[in-house]
Amino acid sequence: MAAGGAFVLLLVAGIWTALATSTASLQVTSVAPADHASNVTGVAPVTVRFSKPVAATSPMPKVSPDIAGTWHRVGARTLKFVPTVGFDQSRLVTVTIPGGASGVRSTSGALLASTEKVHFRTAAYSTARLDELLAQLGYLPLTWTPSAGQTVPAAGDAAGQLAAAYHAPQGHFTWKSGYPTGLRRFWRDGTTAGLILQGAVNAFEEQHGLTVDGYANGVAGPKVWDALLTAVAAHDMNKKGYSYAIASEGNPEMLTIWHNGRQVLQTIANTGGPESPTTIGTAPVYLKHYFQVLKGTNPNGTPYSSPVYYISYFRGNLAVHWYPRPSYGFPQSLGCVELPWSVARTAWLYLSYGTLVTVQPGSQTPSTSPVVSTT
C-alpha cells in the first residue's frame, strides 16, 4: 500500500478482500494568470489546473469582480473561465477556488484541503487605442487607418473593443489638411500623451457630461473609457468639430482660429502688458462662461472688478474674452487675450472645450484659407 492510502474491505463471493483506495488530497498545480501578476490583459481566460481529474459535480471557482462568463472543463484536470467581455483596466481580480468538504473534489473523492485564492491586476488600456478611437469619432485633427491584415473590431463588438483597448491594432495617422503646421508639434504619434490628446479628451468629457479634468496625470479614467466605448458603439461623433487658435504678439496683435481644416476667424486682439505679460505657450480650453465679473488687483495695487463676456479659460486665470477698449492690437491687458465685441461671440463659439490655444511672440501666422470674419 502506498503512503497516504487506506484499505477498504469488500465482500466478494463470500471472501473479504482488501482494496487500496487513495485518500491523498487534491491539489491546485497552477493558475493562470498567476498569483500577484500585473499588467494582465482583462480579456484573457482564467485557467485552473489540478493534480487529479475533477469530479463533474464539483463546484466551480469564482472570480471577483463578478463579470459575465462561463466556466468550461478542458480535459479531465483543467477548469477554464472565459469572460463574455472582460475585466476593466487596472482592476484587482480575485480567483477563489473552494476547498474543504463542500469544495472541489476529484473523481476518486479526494478533496482540495482548503480554499485557495489567487489575485492579479489587469493592465491599463492602451494610449494608442485612445488616440485611434478619438480620431474615429472626430476629436483629432487626424484620421486613423489600420495597417493591412490588422483585425479591427466592429463598433458594436464589445468584447472585441475591449480587447483592442488593451492591445491596440496597428495602423497609421494622417493629418487633415488646412491646419497650420505648428499644430503638429503637439502630437505624440499615438504612443504617449501630448497636448492634442489632452485637448481631445477634454472635449470628449465635456460633450458627454463628464468632469473636464485636464486628462489627469495623462490617464483617461474608467468613466471616460466607458463613455468612449459606448460612443463608438453608437457612432456618436464629435458634434463641435476641431478648432485650434493662435494669439500672436505681433504688430498688430492678432487672434486666428482654424476650425475643421479651414481658417474661420482672424481679428486684432490684445495680450498682456509689460507688467502682466501673457504666458507664452499652448494649453487647452478647460472652462467657459458666457458672462463673469473678473476681480483682482492691478499692477499698481488697486483692486479691479470688470464685467466681461464670452470667456474661454485656457491656462490658469488666463482666458480669451471680450473687454471694452478704445483700440485693440497691442499689449495692454492683465494677461488675458482681449477681443472686440464684434468678434468675441464668434470666437467663443469656436473655442470649445479642449481647443488648443497657442500664445506666440513675433509676427502673425499667415492665413491658410480665406478669412470668414475679420476685424
Image (cartoon, helix red, strand yellow):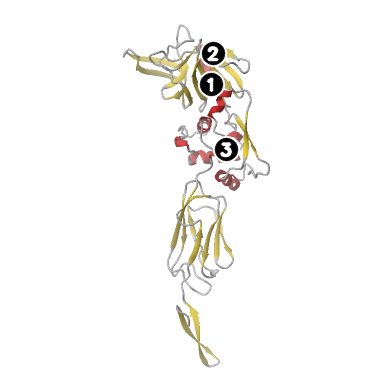
Say which mark, if any, is on residue 245. 1
Q: Which mark is residue 231?
A: 3
Cα distance in 3D space between marks 2 and 3 = 36 Å
Residue found 51% across the figure and 25% down from its top: 356
Give me the C-alpha separation between circle 2 and circle 1. Answer: 11 Å
Residue carrying label 2: 267
Q: Nearer the viewer, mark 2 or mark 3?
A: 2
Q: Position of residue 190 (x, y in %)?
A: 56, 36
Q: Percent x, y for residue 98?
A: 46, 64
Disc 1 secondary structure class: strand
Question: In the depicted view, which residue is nearer to us: 211 or 281?
Answer: 281
Q: Name above or below for residue 330 compared with residue 67.
A: above
The image shows residue 241, relative to residue 129, as above or below, that is above
Residue at (49% x, 61% y) in the render = 61
Q: Secondary structure at mark 3?
A: helix
Residue that sits furthest to the left in the current view? 301
Which of the marked residues, 1 or 3, is nearer the chain's N terminus? 3
Circle 2 residues within 10 Å: few <14, some 14–19, many ≥20 = many
Q: In this rendering, would 331 be left or right of 244?
A: left
